[in-house]
Amino acid sequence: MALLLISLSILIISSLLILLFCRSKEISACVFLWSLVAACGFGLWSALSVLCQKAMSLPLTGVDFRVHGTIPLGEFYIGIDALSAFFLLLFFILSLAAGIYGYGYLRDYTGQRNTGVHFALYHLLIIVITLVLVAKNAVLFLVAWEIMTFVSYFLITFYNESESVRKAGYLYLISTHVGVFCLLVMFLIMGAQAGSMNFDQMTATQFPLALAALLFMLAFVGFGIKAGFIPFHIWLPHAHPAAPTHISALLSGVVVKLGIYGLMRVMAIVKDFPLWCGVLLLIMAAISGVGGVLYALGQHEIKKLLAYHSIENIGIITLGLGIGMIGHAYHQETVAFIGYAGALLHTFNHAVFKGLLFLSAGSVIHCTHTGDMDHMGGLFKLLPWTGHLFLIGSLSICGLPLFNGFISEWLVYRALLEGVFHLDVFGIIFSSLAIVALALVGGLAALCFTKAFGVIFLGSNKSSEGHQGKEGRLSNIDIKEGDLMLRGPMILLAAICLWGGLFPANMVYFAFQGTQAITGLQIPFVLKEAVINPLLSATRVLSFGGVIFSVLALVRDFLVLHYPVRLTETWSCGYVKLSHRMQYTASSFARPILKIFRSALVFRVEGKISKEYFPAWTSLKSSVKDVSESLLFRPLFYVIKKFSRKLKWIQSGHTQTYILYVFLFLVILLVWKLI
Amino acid sequence: MHILLLLHLTILFVFPPLLLGIIGKTKAFFAGRIGPPLLQPYFDIFKLMHKESVYSVTTNWIFMAAPMVSTAAILAAGTLMPLADFKPPIQFWGDMVLFVYLFALARFVIVLAALDTGSSLEGMGASREATFGCLSEITMFLNLTILALLSRSLSLSEIFLGGLSSSWLQVGPVLILVVVSFFLILLVENSRVPIDDPETHLELTMIHEVIVLDHSGIDLAYVLYGKAVKLFLFASMLVSVIITFRVHDFLIDTAFFFFELIVFAVLIGIVESTMARLRLNKVPYLLFSAFIFSIFGFTVILVRGGH
């Protein structure tokens, strides 16, 4: 805990320093960078020491820190348990990477805005998110949660000269506020039941099942909006593309995950939920997973695609959570443990690879000045570093073996399959449907990322017909790779992806530590072995594959040396006047699968397909509409707006009227007290 | 024990192209021709190894590495699959997930290699392959879940080595549905008629052939070999579901297993000779029917209580 306090104080002091020196860009950036590295270092150390269960043996690491009687009901009471520590681990890794990247990204920024303020806000965001993660008092939690929403709003709207950015910021602010309302009610009910707003007392309290169900629904909506469950996700695909790259990485990697953290915290406090809560969570998870990836497939804009993929991965995480809850409700602890561990591990992994993908996508946008994938192509040769890092990110997010995504998806599969074995017919139906959903999500994610990687980096460039030389290379467009400040964080994240995939034991162990904090039960050693050992065998299969690969590569090298090799143009079936625009685009690649799912999606096509024999000029623009945005929330808000217009007379704008309202309210209170 | 493992690997490495030879011979028989020799796929692979390689200037290393990665991934998946009565070299609880995901990895890199050429024809094939692949994956998982439920095991070796032996008597209908669904998946995954015609070279209609349009020489040899191994693994999986009977005599079991595989290859040859290729927009329906078969099988288990 002392380590964490050191880290927090570094952040507070340095953010003040940054504000002090914000006139000078160099000094503020320098302070930002070094304080960030120091603070994240201490933060990681504190998180790791808790996860490694060495908290007691180290002198500096007490467990709790509290200041009594600060505000009514609330107090400054923080403490790290394994669940907090697990989230702190991923949070500090990602905020370090995104912060360094942001430093590199904003260094050559020449616009009007003051980058010093932006850096100070970044530090403030780290402070409040840390507080959210370690708060042991509901009031402190809510206060930190609110500040976090505001700070992230300011960070998202960095480029606020554009109207779409402002709109996205508003949408984010409003939707998270609806969430906070639910959370407030939830914590008040919990506090009333426990007689204290401290999480300790709440955990010790027994909640009746009906109340638990109510609390679950409130948590589901309140935290679900933050996490971006479909249909509460509408803010997410707008906010992510609007924000500067390093902020979108942090938003998708951590801020969205706080919704998951909140749900897990509620599960740790209210232990027993009715069965249907878990089933509901599982269904919503399947919908979010499949829906998120289908919407992602329909996107042409790279950051929007990644934003929808966050929804998909939240779906996978929630599948783990849902099967965990179902297992808990059936008292099948094996299922519950593996489910929760899978959810936790996927949270970590998603933060890492999604951070990597956002950062490398940011580099691409930085170089090409467009986010539209259909105008890219052939960037692998021009941006080799970014290309390779994006490839690693894509392989990880698809859950393919060798990378960390596979490990966590395997755990979720394992939990669902154990569910098939250990539950009754009802449980079997839902866990098998969840398996199908997860398989579908995996397949669609692979489709989506072959599309994204292929269209952005492979083939030849589709945008600048006139500038291309014979070899499909861009000749006079100045595209150059970012420097070490941009590349370094991405390399760090990519290394974690590979490490997590090849040496899974540590992270799985940490995830189990977090699971113990959620369930409050000790996980038997046998179970840990039964999960980690298969993963080690899986590594053996992969190393066998590696051996075969090297043999094949050696044979190939030998043959290539001894037989002729010719370089030529891509075979175009005899057609000579080939244009670079005649490649498969992102839209055409995704078309078959979207056509199959057309009943679940809403398409909008502008323009028309020319069917004449000698086609003249024509244009076609197709997009996939977000159902919950255009069919659910837009009409809903329209109705609310219409209704509230009728109440407009209350807000007259005269001060006297408002004083009258206050007076009336006081009278009502007085009368109520008298009765 | 080590000799058995070595034997397992030898079968895995050497036998697969023969299946393609048998299919070719069967098709030739139906067409009234003598056809290529049984060992023709081996000759093809050998010949390709000595051919000139042609690379497009648009491509990167991904194009060259993809055939190797996919073949290595498929062979690695083979180490989890029991053949005849041999235990696989590696087995663990939950290896079926890895098994399917290794095929997904193989598909992923091949699709990327196709996109690497920047050819619109290969883009077309890549898009189709990825689409059908993701639809067949869900059926694959549901089928494996059913088999896991019946044999109460999550390891391929336990499922296929005796785990299903009593299931044919108890829940025969379920297994029939699973077999039908598996067979359809096999046809899709290995791009056989009626989904795809491995014989044609008309680019617009193809799925798998068009993806590897630009590969040549040793790369094409790897692709062909990987394809053969994939067919072999799917066929041996299906055969292990159908024939669960084993006498636990090493020689008889192995001979019987090979006999089954050969019969199976002849069966695929017959399907290919007697059916026309489906129109491309009908292929999803075929995949959905495979899924529906599997769902029916699943429902039957739940009702009959075979779990």
Image (spheres, rainbow, N blue to C red):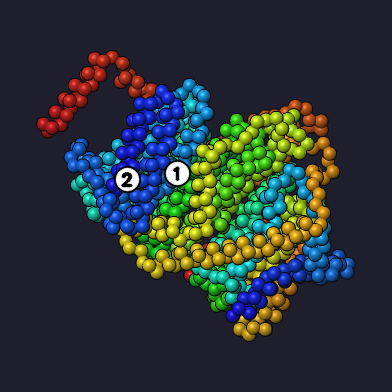
SS type, badge 2 = helix
SS type, badge 1 = helix
Say which mark, if any, is on residue A94. Answer: 1
How far across and how far down the image is residue B234, in percent?
66, 66
Farthest left residue? Answer: A674
Q: CA distance from mark 2 to mark 1?
A: 16 Å
Up/down of B246 relative to A529, above or below:
below
Farthest right residue? Answer: B33
**In this picture, residue A641 sits left or right of residue B183:** left
Chain containing mark 1: A
Chain containing mark 2: A
Neighbour tally class for label 2: few under 14, some 14-19, many 20 plus, Cα within 10 Å: many
- What amino acid is found at the position of numbered circle 1 in the picture? Leu
- Mark 2 — residue? A4
For residue A218, say whether it is visible: no
How far across and how far down the image is residue A649, in percent?
32, 19
How far across and how far down the image is residue B239, in percent?
65, 72
Q: What residue is rendered at 63% in x and 67% in y? A: B78
Q: Nearer the viewer, residue A156 or A6?
A: A6
How far across and how far down the image is residue B273, in percent?
80, 63
**In this picture, residue A282 sits left or right of residue A569:** left
